Image: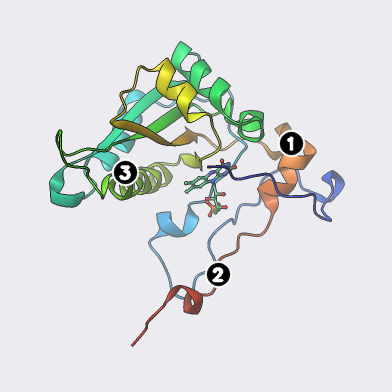
Amino acid sequence: MTDAPLTATALTATTLTATIPADRHANTLSPLLPSLAARWSPRAYDPTAVIDEATLTTVLEAARWAPSASNMQPSRFIVARRGSASFATINDALMGFNRAWADTASVLIVSVAKLSIDETRENPWARYDLGQAVAHLTIQAQHDGLHTHQMGGFDGPAIAAAFNLTEDQAVVTVTALGVLGKLDDLTPELREREVAPRTRKPLTELLLVND
Ligand SMILES: Cc1cc2nc3c(=O)[nH]c(=O)nc-3n(C[C@H](O)[C@H](O)[C@H](O)COP(=O)(O)O)c2cc1C
């Protein structure tokens, strides 16, 4: 459930520019939809930015309208705006390497999967559907000029207890949603990670069969 910090690289604070590189775009084999290519996971958020309610609704609507197995819609969300008690609770439950930057996001969103179909049957696609809903949310946010950063590094039981979740409601991720901030506001260690090259495995490694 964690995404531990990278070890220090050869980059030092003095080699970095004051702004986050404009082009964090994916280096793709063929052109993607602009919001897909532009999406990345920053840690620098504007600590003063407030997302207007209409835009926040749009982002959440993208999650609501994602497909799901048999249209069972197992995705649930805890939406916490910066400054609220819920935001503080979620932020406190993050692992230190996430707490180091996530408190400047405008909104923290806990993604929760409803695990059962009914009293006797599990929904085997609950987490898959939740991930797909969050994926749609991230792309809508990118399209609307916002940024997102999903996290698996948190104390799930602490969040479940704080929000009185049932055993049928699994905390899966926390997503930071906000407006891109300044590289200079990050610690030197976080700055290095913020400008590290974005990489992916080659497509050929992903394709088990490509007949
Ligand atoms: C399920 C999941 C859990 C993640 N957990 C963390 C995390 O705890 N901390 C973190 O900084 N990034 C986390 N990430 C972000 C990934 O590290 C990031 O998406 C990946 O390195 C690719 O970078 P990109 O999103 O900029 O393309 C997580 C992403 C996902 C989808």
Label pair 1/3, CB-CB below 8 angstroms = no
Q: Is residue 3 above or below residue 97?
A: below
- Residue position for label 1: 184
Q: How many marks?
A: 3
The structure residue drawn at horizontal position 22% and vertical position 45%, both measured from the top left corner, is: 123
Q: Which of the two labelled residues, at mark 1 and mark 3, occupies the earlier sequence position?
A: 3
Q: Amino acid at mark 2?
A: Lys
Q: Amino acid at mark 1?
A: Asp
Q: Which mark is residue 201?
A: 2
Q: Which mark is residue 43?
A: none
Give percent across and percent down for residue 169. Answer: 31, 30
In-image side of 149 versus 193 (left or right): left
Spatial CA span between label 1 and label 3: 34 Å
Label pair 1/2, CB-CB below 8 angstroms = no
What is the basis of the colouring in this image?
A: rainbow
Spatial CA span between label 1 and label 2: 30 Å
Point out the frontmost of discs 1 and 3: 3
In-image side of 38 versus 23 (left or right): left
Give percent across and percent down for residue 192. Answer: 74, 47
- Of 188 and 157, nearer the camera is 157
Q: Amino acid at mark 3?
A: Leu
Mark 2: C-beta under 8 Å from nearest atom of ligand 1? no
- Residue position for label 3: 130
Spatial CA span between label 3 and label 2: 24 Å
Q: Secondary structure at mark 3?
A: helix
The structure residue drawn at horizontal position 21% and vertical position 38%, both measured from the top left corner, is: 116
